[in-house]
Amino acid sequence: GEEVAQTPKHLVRGEGQKAKLYCAPIKGHSYVFWYQQVLKNEFKFLISFQNENVFDETGMPKERFSAKCLPNSPCSLEIQATKLEDSAVYFCASSLDLEKLFFGSGTQLSVL
Amino acid sequence: EDQVTQSPEALRLQEGESSSLNCSYTVSGLRGLFWYRQDPGKGPEFLFTLYSAGEEKEKERLKATLTKKESFLHITAPKPEDSATYLCAVQEISGAGSYQLTFGKGTKLSVIP
């Protein structure tokens, strides 16, 4: 597709529940990035992929967060045992060249 | 210490009143500096990439410039549809080969008709 598609738009979870977010990158883009936006404008890098391989995972909280990009499937970001501080908007972006990033509209995760 | 600092946090302009947004950065080696526009409820939309001091890029009413310590986004004769949050981000040269972006907190621009 011509846009990065993120689903769902909104996700509500009770503390301790699992959350799974999906991202379909633009067709032909081999790089996928996940960012977390908290407190309106604080973006935090989580992880990036080159095709199905992890490219950079230096931002990932390893204990509860995991991510995958498998062939012919949307990429996913999973949070096990969500905590209140995981409430944020999670953005996925795809790129052809690691420079110009195209962002999706985000998934708003609310942990109650 | 923040690597990317944007000012002002918020800016109200009358339609047609030109102004500039500032982004100052501290990195050991700059691979690129990026400007994005973000509308409410949407993801950031790419505007410009600048790579070296002295570089300038223009798009419609926007012009981005870069020095060794800061970048400016100049808005000439803004219109209400230019209202958005403008984000600056840097990509640092790193031995680990990371291409992650470090974002500033943005400038929320409101253009009043």
Image: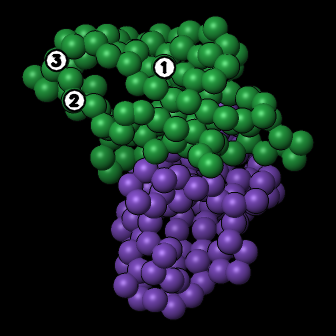
On screen, residue B36 versus residue A25, left or right, reads: left
Pick the front one: B26 or A97 = B26
Chain that is green in the image: B
Q: Is residue A72 above or below residue A27?
A: below
Residue at 65% x, 59% y is A46
Q: Is residue A5 above or below residue B93?
A: below
**Image quarter in which the C terminus of chain A is found:** bottom left
Residue B72: assigned label? 1
User: Is the Cβ of the residue at disc 3 closer than 8 Å to that at disc 2?
Assistant: no
Q: How many marks?
A: 3
> Do the residues at pointers 1 and 3 share their chain?
yes
Mark 3 vs mark 2: give the one in front: 2
Would you identify the image quadrant in which residue B100 lies?
top right
Q: Residues within 10 Å of mark 1 (few under 14, many from 20)?
A: many
Observer-nearest of B1 and A102: B1
Three-letter amino acid code at disc 1?
Answer: Phe
Which is more N-terminal, label 3 or label 1?
3
Residue A9 seen in the figure: yes
- Determine the CA span between mark 1 and mark 2: 17 Å
In this orientation, which residue lies closer to the viewer: B41 or A104? Answer: B41
Q: Chain of mark 2?
A: B
Q: Which chain is purple?
A: A
Q: Which residue is mark 2?
A: B12
Q: Amino acid at mark 2?
A: Arg
The residue that disc 3 covers is B15
Please provide percent x and percent y for residue A85: 48, 76
Image coordinates for residue B20, horizontal then vertical, percent: 38, 19
Q: Are marks 1 and 2 in contact (CB under 8 Å)?
A: no
Badge 3 and badge 2 both on one subunit:
yes
- Circle 3: element type: loop
**Residue at 37 percent of width and 47 percent of height:** B42
